[in-house]
Image (spheres, helix red, strand yellow):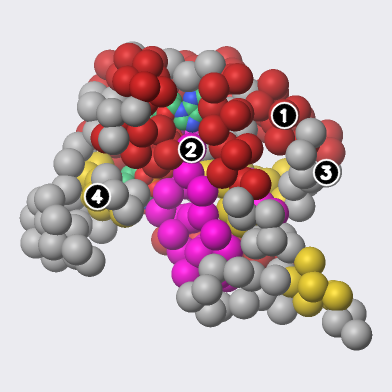
Amino acid sequence: MVLRTVFRAVIMGPPGSGKGTVSDRITKSFGLKHLSSGDVLRANIEAKTELGLLMKSCIDQGQLVPDDVISRLILSNLRSMEQSSWLLDGFPRTVAQAESLDGVCSVDTVINLNVPFDTIKERLTSRWVHLASGRVYNTHFNPPKVPGIDDVTGEALTQREDDTPYTVTRRLKAYEHQTQPVLEYYRSKGVLETFSGTETNKIWPHVQAFLARKIPSSSTTSGGQAAVGKA
Ligand SMILES: Nc1nc2c(ncn2[C@@H]2O[C@H](COP(=O)(O)OP(=O)(O)O)[C@@H](O)[C@H]2O)c(=O)[nH]1
Ligand SMILES: Nc1ncnc2c1ncn2[C@@H]1O[C@H](COP(=O)(O)OP(=O)(O)O)[C@@H](O)[C@H]1O
């Protein structure tokens, strides 16, 4: 009998390190469901929910939103993905968040994108996003086919209000002080895998090979349900 189980991964790295870009490649290659905390927050802002409006000023100022708010939001989303293999992007960003995640499930692997801050700064000011899907472009690295237009839907792309040089500096500070300790937290649990570099196209083959070893019978179907077969 084949026992089916699920695979749970987290992707970490400073703002602009390529988490969204690599997550997109992982979901396409391995069929994991992708949950991005930034996308969930931006969807709330776009929908003008009470929570979204409350969180907007934190985000625009480059600060992290409160642990209890984001933990509740993400853990409730994860409950609806219980039967699926998933990739969590942008959460946890503090040790308190990592502990709250541990309270509901254990993480199989944490992919850490280690990209120098200097590389990141110039990337973010040329980032364009399709808000509804979270698809991300860059005027130099992966431009849309038509400038300012999403390749898939034909809808308009926007620039994030928190991608200004001043706010990016604040976000990098928040990363250093609040998020870097989470790397130590996962390192001590033996699940941290770090990938260093300045170009996603060079980092990606290593991430792909690593996950191919970790998820031996991974599903590449579009169902997004990468059940891992165990003998
Ligand atoms: N120049 C360059 N831009 C990249 C590279 N990888 C990703 N980007 C772009 O950098 C920006 C940040 O990447 P993203 O995946 O959104 O990073 P995240 O903030 O960690 O989720 C986006 O505009 C990407 O298109 C790369 O290797 N070189
Ligand atoms: N886990 C989290 N904890 C606290 N704030 C968060 C979290 N995830 C996202 N945010 C807020 O949303 C903003 C955008 O997040 P995100 O889209 O993940 O940025 P990036 O991909 O550039 O690192 C963060 O700067 C922060 O204000």
* The residue stretch that appears in magenta: 8-37
Within 8 Å: ligand 2 and the Cβ of disc 3?
Answer: no
State the SS at label 1: helix
Task: Say whether mark 2 is within 8 Å of ligand 2.
Answer: yes
Residue 48 falls in which quadrant of the image? Answer: top left
Q: What residue sits 70% from the left and 71% below the top? A: 227
Q: Which amino acid does label 4 sit on?
A: His
Q: Residues within 10 Å of mark 4 (few under 14, many from 20)?
A: many
In the depicted structure, whether residue 223 falls above or below residue 207? below
Q: Name the residue under label 1.
A: 100
Residue extending farthest left: 147
- Check disc 2 and report its element: helix, strand or loop: helix
Query: Spatial distance from mark 4 to mark 2, Cα to Cα?
Result: 15 Å
For the question of whether residue 95 can be seen, the reply is yes
Q: Earlier in the sequence, mark 4 or mark 3?
A: 4
Q: Name the spot of residue 110 as percent of width and height, x first.
A: 68, 46
Q: In which quarter of the image is the C terminus?
A: bottom right
The extreme bottom residue here reads 1
In-front residue for pair 13/53: 53
Mark 1 or mark 4: whose residue is earlier in sequence: 1
Q: What residue type is labelled 2?
A: Ser
Which residue was labeled with disc 2?
37
How many angstroms separate mark 4 from mark 3 (CA)? Answer: 36 Å
